[in-house]
Image: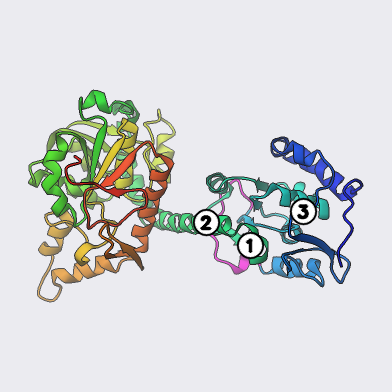
Amino acid sequence: MNLTWNIRNNPIWEKNLRLFRARFPGLFALHEALFSGPSPLPPTGCNVAAARTGAVTLREDGIFLHSAYDPVQEAARLAESLRPGKLPAAPACPASPGPPLVFLGFGLGYLPLAAAARFPELPLVLVEPDVKRFALALAALDWEPVLTRRVCMLLVGAEKPAVIAALEQAGPFSGMIVTALPAVTRHARQYFADLQELIQRNAGKQRINDATLRRFGALWERNCRRNLHLLAELDGVNTLFGQGGVLWPGRGGRACVVAAGPSLETGILRLAAVKERAVVIAVDTALRSCLDAGVEPDVVVLADGQYWNARHIAGLAAPNALLVTEICAYPGVFRFPCRRIVLFDSANPVGAEYGKKYTRKGKLGAGGSVASAAWELARLLGCREIYLAGLDLGFPGKRTHARGSLFEQRSHRTSSRTVPQETAAAAALLSAPPAAAVDYAGTPLASDQRMSLYAWWFESAVAAHPECRTYSLCRESRAIPGVTLAAVGIV
């Protein structure tokens, strides 16, 4: 049966408002007109009703958001299933007492309230895009266990980027326990679906970062100790920010980021013409191919501390180029013959800890790929047109790198009758779970989940900075939303 909703005399509403105003004064002030009025009416299509046990329940378009019999007991059972001990969880951040419980939508709030009682030590994060629905929840149930919670984050009426930014502060994405019940998310299905995808992507990136730290942490530590004096001796990349037009007159408004994907073999033919009108920024793996084509890059970016990354530039020289790297790089990198070496703030926790003792050098995007740092550098130099060459994020022709790159040469040198070059190529192709992709011609492109994370970083970065138009010079590269294929003759 439906309940009579008393909008003028509702003690639960008045109590919750006092607690809400005291705990979240900024959010209260943002929507003061709504929360200063009487108890709100249910949104159109929603009916507040009494369950069989007499508890309040909610029905929307004929569908119950909570149990029609006993919503309290239903929420208690669901809360019990959220026990962190049953789920794999990454270590929480130091400021957090445990993995956050994230509720994407919550209806009247039965499940967050049950979770607050069941897990008094865990942080709560509540997400709801419709402020009026949150107000209805405050009018229906006693929210004191949530509103007096020591660690509680209330993301009401927030845009998706703001929610993701806030979740980054709550703890590692890979350790979050996320709940999104279909009944309570149906009113904003696309909003919650997008959030779930973003959380999953960030969790995947976090797992990769954690695995990378476990594998290379000791190496980064050794490199940092040997390079420590360079933090005081070398300038930061921030001294270059906004100086593209000064350092390269006539070319500072455009940049070309060169990676070492297989499609570089076709894009390299245009690189000499590109350099006449754009700053050429090559990642370490692409330097050899650039020099073989007679094109000396203006900037070389190296962002990995492994020995083999140092080998990409060993024995080469770019006397007119800037080398942009970080303190965790293999020590031999700093003997590279070039015009000047500048540092950027390390993105890994080992290098970041060492860097805290010195003046900040400037941050570059950490998208998992050195090409993301190169793109970010082009943007911060002041370039408003950025071209990508050889950034395939896939395997055109079932190949991993351009001919002439160190990876390709090494596979030939180490091949034998029993372990041919194709064995190394197959291992590289199968090193991560496969993922579907298409190139700029609409042709299916072999790729993997690791490459998909890199592509997502570029998609997000391009969308966040519409002032920088980004183009691909290679039709065979993976099609990234927001990155268009450059027309012939555009550069």
**Residue 26 position by quadrant:** top right
Q: Residue at x 62, y 56 (%)?
A: 102
Left or right placement of residue 362 versus residue 114 in this view:
left
- Amino acid type, label 3: Ala
Spatial distance from mark 2 to mark 1, Cα to Cα? 13 Å
**Residue 21 position by quadrant:** top right
**In what quadrant of the picture does the N terminus appear?**
bottom right
Rate crowding at label 1 as few (under 14), some (14 to 19) or many (20 or more) other CA atoms within 10 Å.
Answer: some
Residue picked out by circle 2: 194
- Percent coordinates x, y for residue 56 in the rendering: 84, 62
Residue picked out by circle 3: 137
- Percent coordinates x, y for residue 288 in the rendering: 13, 47
486 is within the stretch colored magenta: no
Q: Residue at x 81, y 70 (%)?
A: 70
Q: Is residue 289 visible?
A: no
96 is within the stretch colored magenta: yes
Rate crowding at label 3 as few (under 14), some (14 to 19) or many (20 or more) other CA atoms within 10 Å.
Answer: many
Tell me which numbered mark, 2 or 1, is placed earlier along the sequence. Answer: 1
Spatial distance from mark 3 to mark 1, Cα to Cα? 16 Å
Above or below residue 106? Residue 352 is above
- Amino acid type, label 1: Arg
SS at circle 1: helix
Q: Residue at x 25, y 59 (%)?
A: 441
Residue found at the very far top of the displayed protein: 246
**Magenta residues, start to end:** 82-97
Above or below residue 483? Residue 186 is below
- Percent coordinates x, y for residue 332 in the rendering: 21, 42
SS at circle 3: helix
Tell me which numbered mark, 3 or 1, is placed earlier along the sequence. Answer: 3
Q: Residue at x 72, y 46 (%)?
A: 150
Residue found at the very far bottom of the displayed protein: 418
